[in-house]
Image (spheres, rainbow, N blue to C red):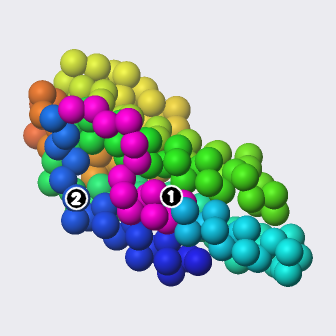
Amino acid sequence: MQLETIFHLQEMTNREYLEDQDTEEPDDFIISLTAQITRRDEEMAPFVAPVKRNYIFGGICSIAANASIRVLADLRSINLFGVQQICRNSIALEQALAVIPSIDSESVQLRLDRVRTYYELLNMPFEASQLALLAFIAEHEHLFTAKEYGYLLKVKVPGREVPPDAQRRVSAVLSR
């Protein structure tokens, strides 16, 4: 299941997240993955003990969260609707995993909330509210790695200006 999760989520790197309108549905690859998770759980439930189902499905959330965050390194640009789409994808995955009784839905929520928080930081203009972004980083320095914070600065977001010394400022906050 972990390999299938990676297989489906690699589609994120092939997709442009420069939407021109808001969509209501998650991406097709997420719909396919969540349907597969649900179907497999339903097929296994009568025959496989909950602790073993937890073993089978338990790592999906961590894999999905880490893959979703790492994909930002491969994206050239993303806009507000693209951020919303990625957040919608993580909500759909969270809902699919939360209904599996053997999975701790609280840990699923925490991991996928981290993904949403990460992408929502892209909507925070650096220069206009650099104090807010730098304050967030100072308060949550261990929530993401220095490299992950760096990817937030490198991806192009229409309408967001990132000063040339932004990486240095973030590094200074993280080194305190």
Q: Is residue 80 magenta?
A: no
Residue type beneath disc 1: Ala
Name the residue tied to disc 2.
15
Which residue extends farthest top? 128
Report the quarter where the C terminus lies: top left
Asked whether residue 161 is in view, the answer is yes
For mark 1, what is the residue? 65
The foreground one among 10 and 42 is 42
Of residues 163 and 114, the one drawn nearer to the viewer in this rendering? 114
Amino acid type at circle 2 is Arg
Q: Where are the magenta residues, as a range?
A: 21-34
| Quadrant housing residue 15 | bottom left
Crowding at mark 2 (Cα within 10 Å: few <14, some 14-19, many 20+): few
Is the residue 83 above or below the residue 27 in the image? above
Residue drawn at x 74%, y 46% is 106
The answer to whether one can see residue 122 in this image is: no
Give the number of the disc on residue 167.
none
Q: Quadrant of residue 130?
A: top left
Residue 26 falls inside the magenta stretch:
yes
- Horizontal relation, residue 106 to residue 164: left or right: right
- Helix, strand or loop at disc 2? loop
* Residue under the point 27% across and 41% down: 82
Category of crowding for the residue at label 1, using alpha-carbon neighbours closer than 10 angstroms: few (below 14), some (14–19), many (at least 20): many
